[in-house]
Image (spheres, rainbow, N blue to C red):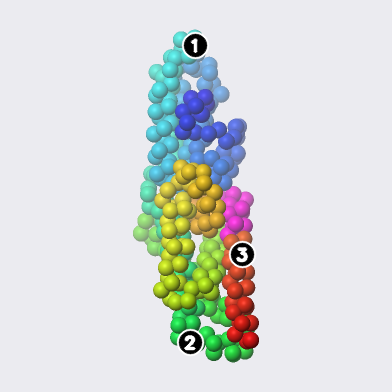
Amino acid sequence: MSAFVNSGYFNLVADSATDDEIEQLINRNQARAALIIPARYGADVVSRRPTDVQVIIDGDNSNSATTVIGYAQSIVAAITPNASGVVFAPVMRLEPRVWYNPQLRSTLFLVPGLIAYISMITAVISTALSVVREKERGTMEQIRMAPVSPVSYLLGKTIPYLVLSFLSALLIILVAMALFDLPMRGSWLHLCGAIGLFLVGAQAQGLVISSVAPTQQVAFQLALLSSFLPTFILSGFIFPISSMPQAVQIITHVIPARYFLVALRAIVLKGAELSAFWWDLVALGIFAVVMLTLASARLSRQWRASDR
């Protein structure tokens, strides 16, 4: 344990004694790996009998899992004799076990990220452009004069794109299951709920952009800057959040795709229960409520201004 912690590559986050506790820690993303030391380890080493040390690794991120295996193997191979002169290396072997993605296939890591990436872009851009298009064509004033409330207008603008974005996300999953053997180990109900929360927040973000942007070109640029780059760089899709600078890690807490990816991988790859990712769904719900409140407030203000 000292060798792993002192290496600088690992942090000790918990001391567990049961398989269920280890599974919960990994499913909740509180631990990326678990070091299993058998009860007979000390006696075997002293008596120079061969012994194994196991490392269980979360394989939902194939890149991180490969790195963890390399670090663990180098640490075990570099263990030096202790003060009593007992040499550990010849009698100790490391047995890595990768959960959820034993073959470390990059497809199982990339597909959930692509779902978040494509869904975020399509939902934000389509919603933002649909409202701004009304401004450019001059039909927004006619809509405001019609007996339509801001809430009805918001629902009319978002529901069609919500359905299309939802169907596209499910289509990506079905195609990945057919072509790339993507597993579906969790609940479809949980999956649909996570996708729905994520898309509602993304569309609300598009409505906020549409209330600010004067033209479709500006709306398109704002939508790309607020959805494309954060989802690609700061969500954990490509770069692990734990390897980012501390200041950047703080910024990632306001990126909805971060929470969506955790929930999506927990459902699809791990088959985890709701207790393992409920906080990520709460975070998506909070983001959706905040964005919907901002969009409704700005649209209501514009509605009242046009009435005067």
For label 2, the crowd category at 10 Å Cα-Cα, with few meaning under 14, some 14 to 19 and many 20 or more, is few
Q: Which residues are magenta?
A: 270-284
Residue 184 in view: no
Report helix, strand or loop for mark 2.
Answer: loop
Residue drawn at 60 percent across, 74 percent down: 298
Observer-side mark, 2 or 3, equals 2
Residue with the mark numbered 1? 83
Question: Which image quadrant for residue 137?
Answer: bottom left
Q: Which residue is mark 2?
A: 138
Contact between labelled residues 3 and 2, with CB atoms less than 8 Å apart:
no
Residue type (three-letter) at the residue carrying disc 1: Ala
Judging depth in this view, the residue of 24 and 160 nearest the camera is 160
Question: Residue 37's spot in the image, x, y percent?
Answer: 52, 27
The picture places residue 233, in percent across and down from the top left corner, at 43, 53
| Pointer 3 residue | 290
Q: Position of residue 118 (x, y in %)?
A: 42, 64
Which mark is drawn over residue 172?
none
Badge 3 marks a residue whose secondary structure is: helix
**Mark 2 → mark 3, Cα distance in angstroms:** 29 Å
Name the kind of residue labelled 3 in the image. Answer: Val
Within-10-Å neighbours for mark 3: few <14, some 14–19, many 20+: some
- The quarter in which the C terminus is drawn is bottom right
Alpha carbon distance from label 1 to label 3: 59 Å
Helix, strand or loop at disc 1?
loop
Residue lying at 60% horizontally and 57% vertically, measured from the top left? 283
Marks 2,1: beta carbons within 8 A: no
Identify the residue at image location x=47%, y=31%: 8
Report if the CB atoms under discs 1 and 3 are less than 8 Å apart.
no
